Amino acid sequence: MSVLNFVADETMAGLRIDKALISKVDFSRTRLQQLIADGLVEVNDEVVRSNYKLHKDDEITVEVPEAVEYSVQPYPMDLDIRYEDDDVIVINKPRGLIVHPSASTREHTLVEGVLYHCHDLSGINGVMRPGVVHRIDKDTTGLIIMAKNDLAHQKLADQLADKTMSRKYYALVSGVIPHDSGTINAPIGRNPQDRQSMAVTDKNGKDAITQFFVRERFRKNTLIECHLKTGRTHQIRVHMQYIGYPIVNDPKYAPKHSRGNGQLLHAFELTFLHPRSGERITVNAPLPQDFADWLDRLREEEK
């Protein structure tokens, strides 16, 4: 990774940082905005958003990952397909599978498996993320919808934006939540102390809202159902850790409670309007076996 350093002069003062840096670096604006979104641009040692307006003498640092050539190729994969037609495909993603490749990814991803299965996906997100409308974390299990063409992609993206697409999750958390439901409304942004994680923060956070409902209580744990009202990175994981009930086995946000192969978080229901017909479609996916086994052990302990 290379590091570029600049000091804002009078010509840059008052400009948004993404616009000001265009004249300083040999990147497209899209590439520059991605670096900013990834938390790789700092002003006076603090991560900023693309709309930050510079002041004279601001010290700017841009970290640039080494370019890596990567070609997404179809790869045979055993997919748990829960719904499919000519426009969309909904897959129940297993734990440990990354949704799409990145510059740092060298393992096979869900995108490659879906490409092998249906041969074509939408191109709106570019060559690295064909068909990807939304993501779930590598070790989160459950439903993800992908678009087979650009019309479907745009319609589904619009539903995410206007919140007509519904996503529901089950999570097992550490601690016993005393109230039956709650709403967490706390902004989430990249953690200034650790760019590989997110945090509740006012400095660079975006609005994030999670509703939860208690479904079952145990001696030291609670099974909850979560409804996303926004779609921030690691949202449920960050919000539950923030209120003191981290998700069991979350290696990033609850390392003290981690004794398995990834957070017990499962996207069990997805509801969307079909991009062509407008029909409301709901798809469900059962809990993965390791999650179900964990709950069975807790129920046995209650007897």
Image: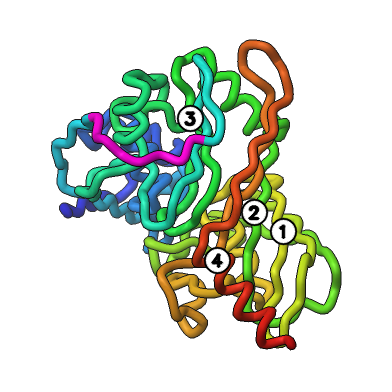
Question: Dot 4 corresponds to which residue?
Answer: 291
**Dominant secondary structure, magenta:** loop
Q: Which residue is drawn at 38% across and 61% down?
A: 195
The vertical placement of 92 against 218, above or below, is above
User: To which quarter of the image does residue 69 belong?
Assistant: top left
Q: Nearer the viewer, residue 222 or 184?
A: 222
Q: Which portion, as a residue range, is magenta?
A: 74-81
Question: Dot 2 corresponds to which residue?
Answer: 169
Q: Residue type at mark 3: give it.
A: Met
Location of the N terminus (image quadrant): bottom left
- Nearest to N terminus: mark 2 or mark 4: 2
Q: Is residue 218 left or right of residue 20?
A: right
Q: Which residue is drawn at 31% across and 39% down?
A: 77
Number of marks present in the image shown: 4
Q: Residue type at mark 4: give it.
A: Phe
Question: Dot 1 corresponds to which residue?
Answer: 225
Question: Dot 3 corresponds to which residue?
Answer: 146
- Nearest to N terminus: mark 3 or mark 4: 3
Badge 2 crowding class, 10 Å Cα cut-off, few under 14, some 14 to 19, many 20 or more, is many
User: To which quarter of the image does residue 260 belong?
Assistant: bottom left
Q: Which residue is drawn at 69% across and 34% down?
A: 282
Q: In this view, does 272 lie to the left or right of 154?
A: right
Does residue 19 appear anywhere in the picture?
A: yes
